[in-house]
Image: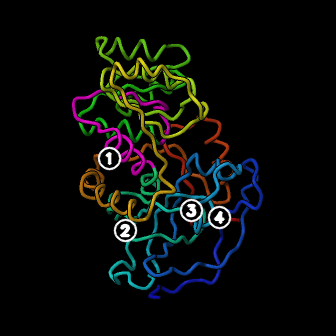
């Protein structure tokens, strides 16, 4: 192993038992060593995502072989290399998608899942990019086949996913409709770039989306709700429209009119990112580096930041995530003590 001088132990935020935000517990653990093909990152910041909250509650166990610690995206410096990793990686500032372990001062990553952090991108912002960028690019552009000139309906417009999807869609010349749960969030969504932001509590998004498109319907829907939203999403879609589901906050089961879907030649797809293979994630990272990362490097794409919490305040970060009041990304500063 090639490494910069390392301590023997590190502070982490663990989940000894499933539960509410208070289940997050500071611990001291040995600093892990990278296996062949892996790197060790001294973590500066870690993104907070809804899957972290689900894992904490016992509803989203980590995949086999992954760290039991939460945290799916990090930024920091590569400080150790496993066998077979290019020595030039040592000392690089990166952000990375990881299978877990981000809520720690040191985290294992794979170099093919890392993206270089340009000098003009703060590490707090860098940590807020990987999970949403990988998810949005794969689901909107790869699975959803988004094209310039099309209109997309994005639910959860002020979430980390929603804000990233909005910005990417606008950068690739799409028209964006979003839904949010308050007029204030709708205003925030418009500031991010939405052409039409709807308050789903007071407006019918199906009616409004079809009116906005002169009755044609949208080409694409990015949905995190499922449940009884599924048929409504199909109703908002036009002919040959695509519905992409990435979460089931409204319930895992839906009842839809298959005949109507067939007549209108619509399609439904969905995916989860965490269980996908290292090879798949590496290929996705490579495409992002080629196509999207230049927009990050020249400052056109930046995550919408909500709030940064100290490592010791991870429970408060989860409380804010679950309250649904955040606009954009929540991150943890992992450079302080976990006690």
Does residue 5 lie above or below 313 as drawn? below
Rendering coords of residue 152 (x, y %): 34, 29
Mark 1 or 2, closer to the camera: 2
How far is the residue under mark 2 from the one under mark 4?
22 Å
Rendering coords of residue 101 (x, y %): 58, 65
Q: Nearer the viewer, residue 262 or 114?
A: 262
Q: Nearer the viewer, residue 246 or 15?
A: 246
Q: Is residue 296 left or right of residue 66?
A: left
Quadrant for the C terminus in the image: bottom right
Residue 156: mark in rendering: none
Mark 4 or 1, closer to the camera: 4
Q: Which residues are magenta?
A: 132-160
Q: Secondary structure at mark 2?
A: helix
Instruction: Work out whether mark 4 precedes mark 1 in sequence or the reverse, and give the earlier one.
Output: 4
Which residue is painted at 52% across and 60% down in the image? 45
Residue picked out by circle 4: 68
Residue picked out by circle 2: 112
How far is the residue under mark 4 from the one under mark 1?
32 Å
Residue picked out by circle 1: 301
Rendering coords of residue 290 (x, y %): 24, 57
């Amino acid at each position: 192993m090639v490494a910069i001088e390392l301590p023997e132990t590190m502070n982490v935020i663990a989940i000894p038992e499933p539960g509410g935000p208070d289940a997050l517990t500071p611990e001291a653990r040995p600093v892990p060593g990278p296996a062949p093909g892996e790197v060790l990152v001294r973590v500066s910041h870690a993104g907070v995502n809804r899957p972290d909250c689900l894992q904490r509650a016992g509803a989203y166990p980590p995949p086999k072989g992954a760290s039991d610690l939460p945290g799916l995206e990090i930024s920091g410096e590569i400080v150790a290399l496993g066998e077979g990793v290019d020595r030039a990686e040592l000392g690089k500032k990166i952000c990375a998608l990881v299978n877990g372990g981000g809520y720690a001062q040191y985290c294992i990553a794979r170099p093919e899942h890392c993206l270089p952090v340009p000098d003009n991108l703060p590490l707090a912002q860098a940590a807020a990019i990987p999970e949403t960028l990988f998810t949005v690019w794969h689901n909107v552009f790869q699975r959803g086949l988004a094209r310039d000139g099309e209109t997309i309906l994005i639910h959860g417009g002020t979430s980390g996913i929603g804000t990233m999807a909005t910005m990417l869609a606008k950068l690739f010349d799409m028209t964006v409709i979003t839904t949010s749960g308050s007029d204030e969030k709708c205003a925030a969504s418009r500031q991010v770039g939405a052409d039409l932001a709807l308050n789903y509590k007071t407006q019918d998004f199906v009616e409004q989306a079809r009116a906005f498109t002169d009755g044609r319907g949208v080409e694409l829907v990015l949905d995190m709700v499922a449940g009884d939203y599924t048929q409504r999403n199909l109703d908002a879609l036009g002919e040959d429209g695509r519905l992409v589901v990435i979460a089931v906050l409204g319930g895992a089961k839906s009842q839809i009119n298959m005949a109507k879907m067939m007549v209108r030649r619509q399609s439904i797809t969905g995916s989860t990112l965490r269980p996908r293979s290292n090879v798949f994630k590496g290929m996705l990272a490579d495409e992002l580096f080629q196509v999207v990362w230049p927009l990050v490097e020249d400052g056109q794409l930046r995550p919408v930041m909500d709030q940064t919490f100290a490592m010791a305040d991870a429970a408060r970060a989860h409380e804010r995530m679950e309250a649904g009041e955040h606009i954009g990304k929540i991150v943890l500063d992992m450079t302080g003590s976990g006690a």
